Image: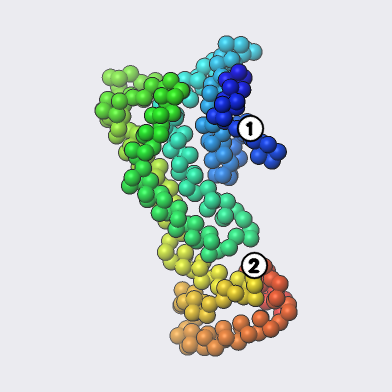
Amino acid sequence: MTKTIEALQSGEISSGRGLNQEIAVKRAGDTRWGSHYGTILRLISLFPSVVNVLEYVEEDGNNSEQRAEACHLLNVIQSFEFIFNLHLMKNILGVTNELSQALQRTDQDIVNAMALVKVSKQRLQTIRDDGWSLLLDEVSLFCDKHNITVPKMDDIFVSQGRSRRKAQKISNLHHFQVEIFYQVVNRQLQELNNHFTEVNTEMFLCIACLNPRHSFLAFDKEKLIQLAQFYPLEFSSTQLLALDSQLENFILDVRSDDQFSNLNGIGVLSQKLVEN
């Protein structure tokens, strides 16, 4: 507690005021990556206090099981590998946090969401190409500050709990850079590429042209014709030729009808079209 008060007084951590008051490490939600990201940020910010609490429990816990668990957790969180993974996930989830929040909103603008997908892919690729040294420096500084041993990257990696004789003959550099850093970044990039291919991203942008907000301001006839071309079984070449004129009629009709003047989303538009 004393260290926490000192950190607050020095400005190292902030308690905030009112709605911004967040000085506890909260339990992460099961399905919200933003929740995990917030937990990681608080754990990094309150790391000395977390260590303090665990040391107290290790010494004065209610029973031997509780004291043993606190001792185990202290060994884990004060290891270089834990700190490395903590900061790596902070950086990865920091890249995709805005996208994750945007995709959870029911009123999210599709165009904005697709822009965030593009930004996330670019940033992750930059981290993969140029982020290793920056991450290692960040982790090393944190470890030095909190008296955590930083292994030499050229030494043979030994997993906790295994003897050096049984260790796989790889260097610390290979383990942390190739087996963790590249693996995690590559997997995150692959997830985004799998969910948002060039084709379905273009489809989302085309669908956004039907957004009825602001009197169908986003309407784009050419993109909607392009959208129809993604469905060759539904639109023959003759129907595609007719679609140009049909879309002209559609936009004049909905813009002149008061029933469509205050709609706020494509889902509401679909319901209104079915009703009429």
Q: Nearer the viewer, mark 2 or mark 1?
A: 1
Which element is circle 2 on?
loop
Percent coordinates x, y for residue 4 in the rendering: 59, 23
The answer, for residue 210, to whether it is visible in the render is: no
| Whether residue 11 is situated above or below residue 231 in the rendered picture | above
Q: Is residue 155 left or right of residue 30?
A: left
Say which of 138 and 90 sits in front.
138
First in sequence: mark 2 or mark 1? 1
Q: Is 161 left, or right, of 171 in this rendering?
A: right
Q: CA distance from mark 2 to mark 1?
A: 39 Å
Residue receiving disc 2: 265
* Label of residue 27 in the image: none
Quadrant in the picture for the C terminus: bottom right
Q: Is residue 202 visible?
A: yes
What amino acid is found at the position of numbered circle 2 in the picture? Answer: Gly
Residue at the spot 44% in from the left edge and 24% down from the top edge = 145
Q: Residue at x 62, y 69 (%)?
A: 266
Residue 162 pos. (x, y %):
36, 21
Q: Amino acid at mark 1?
A: Ser
Q: Which residue is mark 1?
A: 15
- Residue 155 location (% of width, % of height): 27, 25
Q: Is 67 located above or below residue 206 in the figure? A: above
